[in-house]
Image: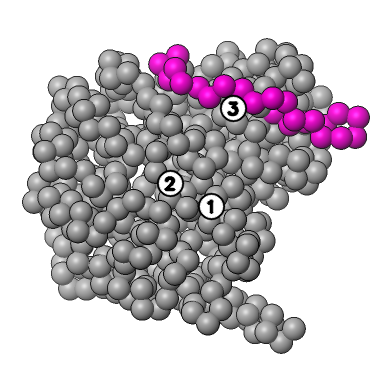
Amino acid sequence: MKTLFVNPPSFEGFDGGAGARYQCRREVRSFWYPTWLAQPAAMIPNSKLVDAPPDDLTVDQVAPMARDYDLVVIHTSTPSFDNDARFAARVKQENPNAIVGMVGAHVFVLPEHSLEHAPAVDWVSTQEFDYTCVEIAQGKPLGEVGGVAYRENGTFVRTPDRPTITDMDSLPSVLDVYKRDLTIENYFNGYLQHPYISFYTGRGCKSRCTFCIWPQTISGHLYRVKGVDLVEAEMRHGKELFPEVKEWFFDDDTLTDNAPRVEEIARRLGKLGITWSCNAKPNVSRSTLEVLKENGLRLLLVGYESGVQEILNSMKKGTRLDHIRKFTKDCHELGIKIHGTFILGIPGETPETIRQTVEFAKEMNPETIQVSLAAPYPGTFLYNQARENGWLQAEESDLVDSHGIQHAALNYPGLLTTEMLFESVDDFYRKFYFRPKKMFSLLGGMITDPQVMKRRLREGKEFFQFLNERKKEEKAEQQRAKAAAAV
C-alpha cells in the first residue's frame, strides 16, 4: 500500500515526536527528528514522511495529502492524543478508504482506550512497530499481524506479541528518508550546532529510571545495537548526503553504557572528521572521555536530574553524587561541553531539595540546562506510583496547557503543591542563568562568533517569551487550585 507517515500538527512549537523524552513546548524552538517514524518509512517503498510541527504545517495543509495514500500511520503521544484523534478523523473525511493506524508509547500502553477514544483509527501498535507497519502495508490481514489491537464485530481484538527486534543491522538507514522528506534546517536545538541531525545506533536502556517513558514502553531495557562497521558506513553516507551538517547527535538512551563500543565508534568518527554529541549518564570514566574528546566529541547530554542523593535513589537513577562530581570535573578539564537536564517533583521532593538541586546545578555549571517537571506518563513506574498514592492532579491529556507548556501534574500534600512546583521551574532558570559567571560565559561565546550571537539573541527572545507564557499559566494554575479548594 502507498503509505503516509505523519507526526501531526499540534500546539505551536510542540515537540511530540518519538525522539522527544518529554513531549511539550521547549524553552526555545527545538525539535527532535522523527526517527521512529522514519525507520518503517525506510522499509516501505513509495512511502512518505511528514513531520508537521517543524515545518509549521497546519491540519488543512496535511490532511488532504491522505487522499493519495492507502495507509496513514500517525505518531501520537499522551499530551497530544486528543488532538491526534481529531486529526485521524479529518484524515478519514479526506479519504474514507484509507486505513489509519496509530503508533507511539501512548497507544502501546492503552490500546483499547485509544481505539475507544479515536473512532477513526483502525489499528494501534502494541509493540515496536517497524515490521508491523511493513506487514500491514503489504496487505496482511490485521488478525495475522503481531503486536496490534483493532476492532472486530464491536469488540477490541489484540494479536499476540511479536519478537523484539534484536538484529539492528537488518534495519535500513533512516538518513535517506531524512534527505527525501525532511527539511533539516527546520530542526533547531538549543545546545547543538545548527544544522544538526539526530538518529539512533541502538534501542533500549538497561537503566530503571522511574520517569523515563521509552525503556518502560516501546524500546525496553535490553540495549540492542548496530555493529560498529555499519555505524561507520552510515556516518560516511551521512556526510555525503548532508555536507552542511555541523553536528551529529546519537540519540541512543545511553550510548556510553558500552565503553569499548563507544570508544571504537569514536575512533571511526575521528577518522571521518565528524563533530558529534550523545546522551550519557554522569558516570563515564575519564579514560573513555579522553578517547571520545580526541575523536570529535563536542557535547554530552547528561541527565543530572537532582542534586540530592535521596531523590536520585527515589527515581532509581543509579548514580551517586560523588561520581557525578568527578565526571563533571573531568568533562570541564577535557573541554567537553555539557547540557544538563534536571527534573523537579519526583516523590520525596520538597522546597529544600529543590533549593539544593539549584545550588548543585550552579556548582556543576553545565553549558546549558533544561528543567522539566516530573511527568507521570502512562506506562511508567512514576505514573503507577502517583495513581496509587493519590498524587496525580491532572488527567493524562492535561499534562500540557493549551499552548503545549507543561502542567505541574503532581501534588504532595503538606510538602509540595502544584503551584510551588510550577513556580520552581522559572526560579531554577533565573538562578542558574542570571549569574555574572554564566552571563559572561555566554556573552564571550557570542562575541567570538557572529553566528552564535545571532542564534543566542533569537533564543534569548524565545526564552523570555516562554517565561512570560509560563507566568500566565502560573496564574491560571493558581485559579484552578483555588477553584478546587472551594469545591
Q: Are marks 1 and 2 in contact (CB under 8 Å)?
A: yes
Judged left or right of residue 22, residue 132 is: right
Q: CA distance from mark 1 to mark 3?
A: 23 Å
Task: Of the two numbered discs 1 and 3 on the same chain, state the one appearing first in sequence.
Answer: 3
Q: Nearer the viewer, residue 154 or 49?
A: 154
Assign a secondary structure to mark 3: loop
- Residue carrying label 2: 208
Residue 184 vertical position relative to residue 77 in the rendered view, above or below: above
Residue 451 vertical position relative to residue 305 in the rendered view, above or below: above
Residue 92 vertical position relative to residue 374 in the rendered view, above or below: above
Assign a secondary structure to mark 2: loop
- Residue carrying label 1: 381
Residue 481 vertical position relative to residue 293 in the rendered view, above or below: below
Q: Nearer the viewer, residue 54 or 478?
A: 478
Quadrant assignment for the N terminus: top right
Judged left or right of residue 261, residue 462 is: right
Direction right: furthest residue: 153
**Identity of the residue drawn at 58% across and 41% down:** 105
* Residues shaded magenta: 148-170
Residue 129's disc is 3
Direction bottom: furthest residue: 486
